[in-house]
Image (tube, rainbow, N blue to C red):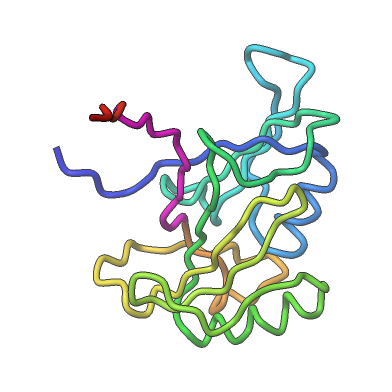
Amino acid sequence: MELLGLHHISIFTENARRNFDFYTKVLGLRLVKKTVNQDDPYTYHLYYGDEIGSPGSAVTFFEVPNMVKNRPGRNQISALSLRVPNDAALDYWDKRLDEFEVFHSLGEKQFGRKIIRFKDVDGLTIHLVSDEENERKEAAHPFKDGPVPIEYAIIGLGPVRISVFKKRKKRMRC
């Protein structure tokens, strides 16, 4: 079986309203659906994605009030990547993140592709990744009515970094 990418990713947020404002107003994603957690109907479950909610574009969040800020650790999603069409889009995002006073990096490369790195409202590291050098581009459906021009809009999920605990083998001393 060949894995072609991620269908969606689910993450926790401390405050659904702040999360909504950041992901829709700053990042320009479409709120695809607002529902509740099936296991806890008092918990919001927010779905964001592209214009048509395509597989590979969805990021979902479960609200966990009073959750502590994200900090690097083990057994967690430690970075989420979102793809943008090309390097010119990263120039747009540099200016946009400045406008919203989101501290970010610029001019970095990861696996041969240009990225911008920043943190969301809960402290999760996010990478905006240019698709310019991506050999396997899927059809994109950017959110047309969003605050970001479609030629620069987020077009889907990129790589996700998961930090896990690795058990070390016991060493024998002689």
Question: Residue 127 appears at what percent x and percent y?
Answer: 54, 64
Quarter of the image with the N terminus is top left
Can you name the residue that lies furthest to the front here? 174
How many marks are shown on the rendered structure?
Answer: 0
Q: Residue at x 39, y 73 (%)?
A: 131
Q: Residue at x 68, y 45 (%)?
A: 71
Residue 168 within the segment the image draws in magenta: yes
Question: Residue 129 appears at what percent x and percent y?
Answer: 47, 70
Side of 138 where 38 appears, left or right: right
Residue 90 within the segment the image draws in magenta: no
User: Is 99 drawn above or below residue 119 in the view shown?
Assistant: below
Question: Residue 69 appears at what percent x and percent y?
Answer: 77, 42
| Range covered by the magenta-colored residues | 157-169
Q: Is 139 in front, or is 15?
A: 15
Question: Residue 60 appears at what percent x and percent y?
Answer: 60, 39
Quarter of the image with the C terminus is top left
User: Is 161 drawn above or below residue 63 in the view shown?
Assistant: below
Quarter of the figure with residue 114: bottom left
Quarter of the figure with residue 89: bottom right
Q: Residue at x 63, y 15 (%)?
A: 38
